[in-house]
Amino acid sequence: MTSIEALEAALPAMTRWRVPGGRDVDWAVLEAALGTALPSDFRALAEAYPVLVVDDFLVVSAPAPGAEASWGAACREDEILQDLYEMGDTEEYVPYPRPGGLISWAESNAGDAFYWRTGPADPDAWPVVVRTDNAEWFEFPVGAVAFLAGVYGRTIDVPGMPGNFPGDDPRVLGLSD
């Protein structure tokens, strides 16, 4: 698993948004609402950073302290993904809480969605799945932080993304709690 430090090295503009001492997310409340544990790399990212917006394009979600139950419930009730599934536009993917179902952790302003596939049982082994705005699906055998570090470190290419993704010098905005 890739560390937060590797992501910060690939995306140095994010470091100004690191929360000294952490954000104190109540993971027990969130995971009770969601019905599953989440990958440890994402937990570390969400403890260190608020919601991040990269180049006014990619929004990396993070639960806000005090709003963990609503964040978990929103992930569990992803209406867009459910609609896509009902229309038969998810290939072999299914919405969570079905076994192996998808949970969203980021989105783009162009309609791309970034998920975990919740299988195998160990959340730290969940791969990243991307649905592009062109309705193409791609799976990457890494977690969210390794995926982001790879994209911004230019070792992971995501087909179907705009030609300027990722940007040469990505700007990052942290949305405070």
Image (cartoon, helix red, strand yellow):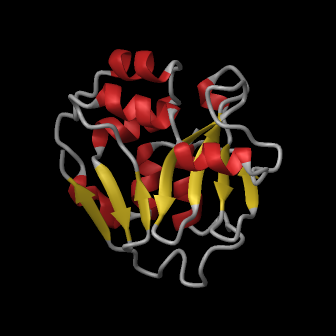
Q: Residue 126, percent across and down? A: 66, 34
Q: Residue 51, percent across and down? A: 32, 51
Label count reads 0
137 relative to 83 in the view: left or right? right
User: Which sits in the foreground, 33 or 26?
Assistant: 33
97 relative to 78 in the view: left or right? right
Q: In which image quadrant can residue 171 be found?
A: bottom left
Q: Taking the image as drawn, is residue 105 in sight?
A: yes
Q: Residue 56, percent across and down? A: 37, 73
Q: In which image quadrant can residue 99 be found?
A: top right
State the quadrant of the N terminus.
top right
**Residue sitting at x 63%, y 69%:** 133
Q: In which image quadrant can residue 23 be found?
A: top left
- Reply above or below: 176 against 70: below
- Reply above or below: 165 against 3: below
Q: Taking the image as drawn, is residue 141 in sight?
A: no
**Residue sitting at x 52%, y 66%:** 152
- Reply above or below: 163 against 91: below
